Image (spheres, helix red, strand yellow):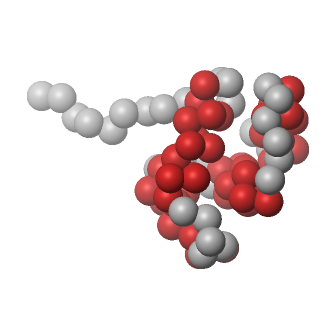
């Protein structure tokens, strides 16, 4: 999904598009399949003022509206 599609989905759900949300959306769009931890690291490298909680809240919001899907990486034996 492109950055523009992510931003549009957020706006459609009534969310304000802040600078921080736009940066997180860009990172997610450019790093398909990245883990939450990887996304946090990339975001923090782009803007040190964006905290981990902000990134996780954004990911959760995107998950809630169906833009991203969580994949659990725990291997059960």
User: Which residue is rendered at x = 68% and y = 30% of the image?
Assistant: 67
Find residue 46 and report its horizontal and vertical position in percent. 66, 73
User: Which residue is rendered at x = 79% and y = 26% of the image?
Assistant: 13
Find residue 40 and report its horizontal and vertical position in percent. 52, 60
User: Which residue is rendered at x = 82% and y = 42% of the image?
Assistant: 16
Find residue 33 and report its horizontal and vertical position in percent. 55, 45
Q: Is residue 48 visible?
A: yes
Q: Is residue 42 visible?
A: no
User: Which residue is rendered at x = 65% and y = 34% of the image?
Assistant: 62
17 vs 54, left or right, is: right
61 vs 26, left or right, is: left
51 vs 19, left or right, is: left
In this view, the residue farthest toward the left is 77
Quarter of the image holding residue 72? top left
Front in this rendered view, residue 77 or 17: 17
Find residue 73 and report its horizontal and vertical position in percent. 33, 38
Query: Taking 17 as reference, is 44 above or below it?
Result: below
Query: Taking 11 as reference, is 46 above or below it?
Result: below
Quarter of the image holding residue 5? top right
């Amino acid at each position: 999904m492109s950055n523009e599609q992510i931003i549009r989905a957020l706006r459609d759900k009534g969310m304000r598009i802040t600078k921080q949300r736009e940066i997180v959306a860009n990172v997610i769009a450019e790093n398909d399949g990245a883990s939450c931890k990887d996304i946090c690291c990339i975001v923090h490298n782009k803007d040190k003022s964006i905290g981990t909680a902000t990134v996780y809240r954004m990911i959760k919001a995107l998950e809630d509206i169906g833009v991203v899907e969580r994949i659990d990486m725990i291997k059960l034996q």
